[in-house]
Image (cartoon, rainbow, N blue to C red):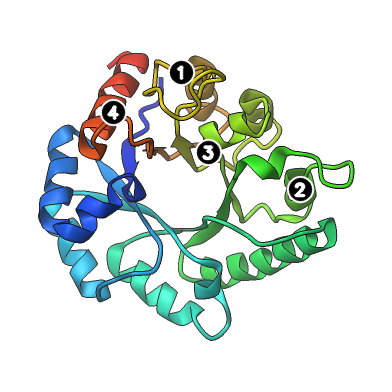
Amino acid sequence: MVYIPIALELYSVHKELAENPWATMKAVKTMGYEGVEFAGRPQFCPEFYAALLKESGLVCCGWHTLWENVQPDTIEQTIELNLAVGNKYVIIPALHAESHDEWTKRAEELNAVAEKLAHYGMKTGYHCHPGDFQLLDGKRPWDTFMAVASERTVFQLDVGNAMQGGADVLAELKAHPGRCQTIHLKPWSKTKGFEPLIGEDDAPWKGIFDFCAGAGATEWYIIEYECPALPPLEAVEKCLNNTKQLLGG
């Protein structure tokens, strides 16, 4: 099977990261993660994040970037930040749209962002949420958005979010081959929601991994776990170990 490295969505340990970024990044690397995806508005200068990555030995495989930070008056700063940390995936974690016309507009606007970022070897994309797969005026917002989003935009499936929204994750992946360069491995079950660890939930992991290693053209698996059932650092280490077992490693 094609080797795909595993990263951590740092929002999973955001409190620890804010309190002690150096120790947190070192702990993540020691667990066996190869990369990280940052989330939200940067709290430090680009040079600090670049040094943090260099010292820890981790790769930046994405940054969940607020919509407000890819607007005409802010995108240059975002480009500067992501060039500094060597990141090519500027992913939008949430979009505000209340109608299909608004979803169409957001997709068109994201296409323009994708064109801008392409000049710097970067891509943008959208991270899905449960409501994206639920009917709005008889149609799913996700379908409206994806019908307009260009091939330059990444479909960052969040496994748990999609399942909670009622989506068949394998069907969603297969409908958009080559668009899932990064994917969030978030566990979910019908009976316990987001509480189970990866491998102890209802996600069809084998099918997901098979797709990602083939038609998905996936470059990074990104583990995300936010349930308070376990201490964050303990939970993400267990999720990593379980993922490796599922992958046969």
The span from disc 1 to disc 2 (Cα, nearest Å) is 26 Å
Kind of residue at disc 4: Leu
Q: Is residue 54 left or right of residue 12?
A: left
Dot 3: element? loop
Tag 2–tag 4 contact (CB < 8 Å): no
Within-10-Å neighbours for mark 4: few <14, some 14–19, many 20+: many
Which of the 4 image quarters holds residue 195?
Answer: top left
Spot the residue most to the bottom.
73
Residue linked to disc 1: 201
| Horizontal and vertical percent position of residue 35 | 28, 45
Q: Hey, what amino acid is under mark 3?
A: Asp
Mark 3–mark 2 distance (CA, rounded to whole Å): 16 Å
In the picture, the quarter occupied by the C terminus is top left
Which residue is under mark 4? 240
- Residue to which mark 3 is pinned: 158
Query: 25 and 214: which one is in front?
Result: 25
- Could you say where residue 61 lies in the image, as x and y percent from the top left? 36, 50
Question: Is tag 3's residue or tag 1's residue first in the polypeptide sequence?
Answer: 3
Which of the two labelled residues, at mark 4 and mark 1, occupies the earlier sequence position? 1
Report the residue at 32% width, 41% height from top.
7
Q: Amino acid at mark 2?
A: Pro
How crowded pointer 2 is (Cα within 10 Å; few <14, some 14-19, many 20+) is rated as many
Name above or below for residue 246 compared with residue 73: above
The secondary element bearing badge 1 is classed as: loop
Badge 2 marks a residue whose secondary structure is helix
How far apart are labels 2 and 4 at the CA level?
A: 32 Å
Which quadrant of the figure contains the N terminus?
Answer: top left
Residue sitting at 68 percent across and 29 percent down? 166
Q: Which residue is mark 2?
A: 141
Marks 4 and 1, how far apart at CA: 14 Å
